[in-house]
Image: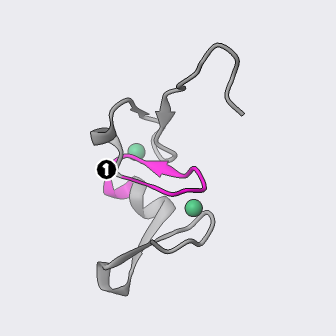
Amino acid sequence: MASRGTPSPVRRCRGCQRELRQPSDVGWECECGAVVCPDSDCFDEYFKQVAGGEATRCRTCGLVT
Ligand SMILES: [Zn+2]
Ligand SMILES: [Zn+2]
């Protein structure tokens, strides 16, 4: 799905569309491609902490990691 001429497209937070240029800019990501910045509002919109915070569920695909 990558556009031609962009071997490493910049990922963006799904919540606020902020560019996530470095690994430290990423708050959480899932193997389905969902990725958010460290902002708790964005995190809560796309992920949910379960098991008392020991695990995280992706709201997009339901995967628990
Ligand atoms: Zn964000
Ligand atoms: Zn997912």
Q: Which residue is found at the position 46% from the left and 65% from the top?
A: 47
On screen, residue 35 above or below 25:
below
Specify whether tag 1 is near ligand 1 (CB below 8 Å): yes
Quarter of the image where one finds residue 53: bottom left
Residue 52's x, y, as percent?
A: 31, 85
Identify whether 29 is placed above or below 23.
Answer: below
Q: Is residue 63 above or below residue 9?
A: below
- Residue that lies at the very extreme toward the bottom in this rendered image: 51
* Total numbered labels placed on residues in the image: 1
Say which residue label 1 marks: 38
Q: Residue at x 37, y 56 (%)?
A: 41
- SS for callout 1: loop
Residue visible at 59% across and 72% down in the picture: 62
Residue type, label 1: Pro
Q: Position of residue 4 (x, y in %)?
A: 70, 17
Residue at the top extreme, as displayed: 5
Which segment is the magenta one? 28-41
Which of 40 and 4 lies nearest the eye of the viewer?
4
Ligand 2 in which quarter: bottom right
Q: Is residue 64 magenta?
A: no
* Lateral position of residue 61 relative to residue 44, left or right: right
- Structural crowding at the residue carrying mark 1, measured as other residues with C-alpha within 10 Å and reported as few (<14), some (14–19) or many (≥20): some
